[in-house]
Image (cartoon, rainbow, N blue to C red):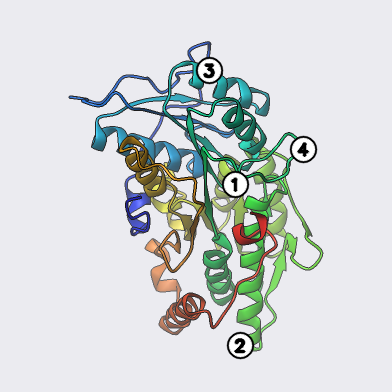
Amino acid sequence: MKSISRAIALTGAGILTLAACGAPPEESASSGGSDGGSGATSDFKACMVSDSGGFDDKSFNESGFTGLTAAKEKLGIETSTAESTDPAQFATNIDNLVSQDCNLIFTVGFLLAPATGTAAQANEDVEFAIIDSTAQDADGNAIEVGNVKPLSFDTAQAAYLAGYVAAGTSKTGKVATYGGMQIPTVTIFMDGFADGVAKYNEVHKADVQLMGWDKDTQKGSFTGDFEDQSKGKALSDTFYSQGADIVMPVAGPVGSGTLASAKEADGRYVVWVDSDGYESVDDDAAKPLILTSVMKGIAPAVEDVATAASSDDFSNEPYVGTLENEGVGLAPYHDLDAEVPDELKSEVDQLKADIISGKITVESDASPQNLG
């Protein structure tokens, strides 16, 4: 397989602006088009199914679509997409892409794991790659399937750095996080963020409070879905009104509600996730409020898997993105760079080096290594 570990900071800069979510796919399940790129010479077809957040979520679905688009342009392959608006569509969307003779099907998100496992076992001649999970059986148990490649990301490592930065830049001594749903690919961010805040308190003998998540009890705040931005705004309004000045939403499009809340008063800031929010969010008024982002390199991973599969070099060996292989990372501070003291930046750089060397181990029950 070609090198999957490239600088993911460049991924956010290349995010495409997509049209708004459309209706669920019809029988063709091709909401993204199935024509090859200009001058296409390959009969290989790579396809993708989004989760219910849709391909314009400014988060992991959009990052996956960006990688698929890059592969299409680079390789001259055909592509087709199926945009889900409800979890009930997952299995049908996958089956429709199978019927379109897709050689490789990417499924985006933990919630698609059972449908992916079922479809892969029923279609052994089709290759699958699932983002943020392994394949699962109908009961939600992880299974290894010969034609499914898991693409996972140890985002706790990068979220640890974000938690440290948030604690170090908070003026109120209170920061917060919340999730869309309580699933491993959400709580892994929250675990890392919590540990980063705790590390800052330990190093600086501080008492920065984290609202919205208790790592020890695994209890916290969730909106219950990845679609309703009003829920994200309401929850963020509560956090900000209770004194938090930095909030990290781990909720896909719901996070836009946090941006809306942050814009309503001075001194409110946001940590974005999955992509570099400063580059991917369309709202110019919100960009200056994004302190940093916890990124995962979904786009380059998708492009590399498509490249390998189109060359008959598909492997079901799991990929785990880490700080060491640049599969996860912390985005630049952009407009808020001056608000982050140089000493704090140096501390974050050292923490990153210590995590890569193994001196510091960021632990989460939701880490890919613990879920396979």
Where disc 4 sits, the SS reads: loop
Q: What mark, if any, has residue 133 been given in the picture?
A: 1
Q: Position of residue 302 (x, y in %)?
A: 41, 43
For the residues labelled 4 and 1, say whether their Cβ atoms are less than 8 Å apart: no
| Residue type, numbered disc 2 | His
Residue positioned 34% across, 34% down in the render: 69
Nearer the observer, disc 4 or disc 1? 4
**Image spot of residue 79 (x, y percent):** 37, 26
In terms of secondary structure, where does tag 3 sit? helix
Give the structural element (helix, strand or loop) at label 2: helix
The residue located at (45%, 63%) in the rendering is 329
Q: In terms of sequence position, does the residue under pointer 4 or pointer 2 come before the other?
A: 4
Nearer to me, 341 or 197: 197
Identify the mark nearer the N-term, 1 or 3: 3
Give me the C-alpha separation between circle 4 and circle 2. Answer: 45 Å
For marks 1 and 3, give the CA distance. Answer: 21 Å
Is 249 displayed left or right of 38 in the figure? right
Judging by the rendered image, the residue that carries numbered circle 4 is 139
Q: Return the disc, 2 or 3, that comes first in the chain's sequence.
A: 3
Percent position of residue 305, x then y: 39, 43
Residue at 29% x, 29% y is 77
| Mark 2 to mark 3 CA distance (whole Å) | 55 Å
User: Which residue is tagged 2?
Assistant: 204
